[in-house]
Amino acid sequence: MSEESYVWGTGKRKCAIAQVRLFPGKGEIIVNDKPYQEAFPRIEHRHMIEHPLLATDNMGKFCIMVKVNGGGLSGQAGAIRHGIARALVKENELLKPVLRKEGLLTRDARIKERKKYGLKRARKAPQYTKR
């Protein structure tokens, strides 16, 4: 892998932030210096990461290096998916309509709602007693 010829993209989901680098290569995906199968044991998370590559028929054409931190596994998988989609658009602008149609370029803005005073969680109220 040559360090100078790569395309990058930043993905975000919940509290997770992923920095994605796309190199021309054989198709391995490395997340935090580990293969993504090791970093994400659940099959749903792996499919989520592969989704932008499968949607654009680029599976096996790029070596992907990812640094991800913050959040949990689902948030990190979503951030990686978002970052890969953004990097693919930088690589080839013609992929943008396909990725946009799949909803992969839109940042999922749902985050944890803050706790309110007088409540147990964001919306759960203490049990009401009549007597």
Image (cartoon, rainbow, N blue to C red):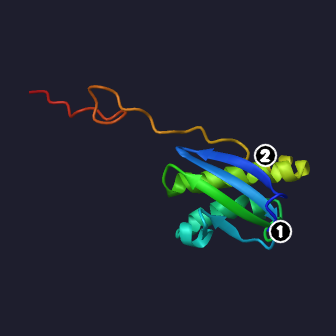
Q: Residue at x 69, y 67 (%)?
A: 29
Q: Residue at x 46, y 39 (%)?
A: 112
Comparing marks 1 and 2, which lies closer to the viewer? 1
Give amino acid for label 2. Arg
Q: Position of residue 88 (x, y in %)?
A: 81, 54
Q: Position of residue 44 (x, y in %)?
A: 58, 64
Residue 102 in view? no
Residue 128: image quadrant is top left
Q: Which residue is mark 2?
A: 100
Give amino acid for label 1. Lys
Q: Residue at x 53, y 68 (%)?
A: 42
114 or 103: nearer the viewer? 114
Residue 105: image quadrant is top right
> In the figure, 112 relative to 19: above or below?
above
Distance CA(mark 1)–CA(mark 2) = 21 Å
Q: Quadrant of the N terminus?
A: bottom right
Q: Which residue is mark 1?
A: 61
Residue 63 lies left or right of residue 93; in this view the side is left
Q: Quadrant of the C terminus?
A: top left
